[in-house]
Image: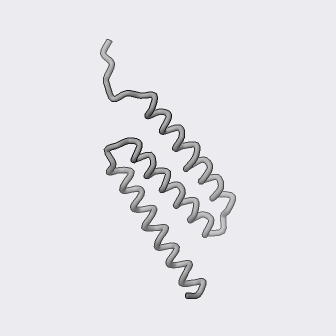
Amino acid sequence: MNFENFFWVLQIFIAIALIGSSIAAIRFKNLIAAVIAMAVFSLALSVEFYVLQAPDVAIAEAGVGAGLTTAMYLLAIRNTTDEEVVE
């Protein structure tokens, strides 16, 4: 397998991962599972940026998209309830 074939196989794999994780994030009823699917999307996107020779963008996407944003969503989910407060 030469490099060009490997590149296209990797592109197809990343595209499937991006589409699959985005559909999963939309379809999950559990919010934590949806956030994890969004983190997988962000990691696949950072791999795509790295493959396209943009390592600085890949590092930023991995750090902010997968790390910080996921943590913020998980903290927001933890600090909220599913009950409506009536005053």
Q: Residue furthest right?
A: 56
Left or right: 42 with respect to 22?
right
Across and down, in percent, residue 60 comes to: 64, 52
Question: Across the whole image, how many numbered discs are drawn on residues?
Answer: 0
Left or right: 7 with respect to 30?
right
Q: Which of 8 and 75 is in front in this view?
A: 75
Across and down, in percent, residue 37 comes to: 43, 52
Which of the image's four quarters has the N terminus?
A: bottom right
Q: In this view, does 4 lie above or below 10?
A: below
In the picture, residue 79 is in which quadrant?
top left
Q: Residue at x 48, y 39 (%)?
A: 73
Q: Which of 7 and 71 is in front in this view?
A: 71
Q: Residue furthest top?
A: 87
Left or right: 1 with respect to 59?
left
Q: In this view, does 35 lie above or below 18?
A: above
Across and down, in percent, residue 52 comes to: 61, 69
Q: Residue at x 35, y 50 (%)?
A: 26
Across and down, in percent, residue 80 comes to: 41, 28
Q: Residue furthest bottom?
A: 1
- How was the colour assigned to the protein in this rendering? one colour
Q: Residue at x 66, y 64 (%)?
A: 54
Q: In this view, does 50 lie above or below 74?
A: below
Which of the image's four quarters has the C terminus?
A: top left
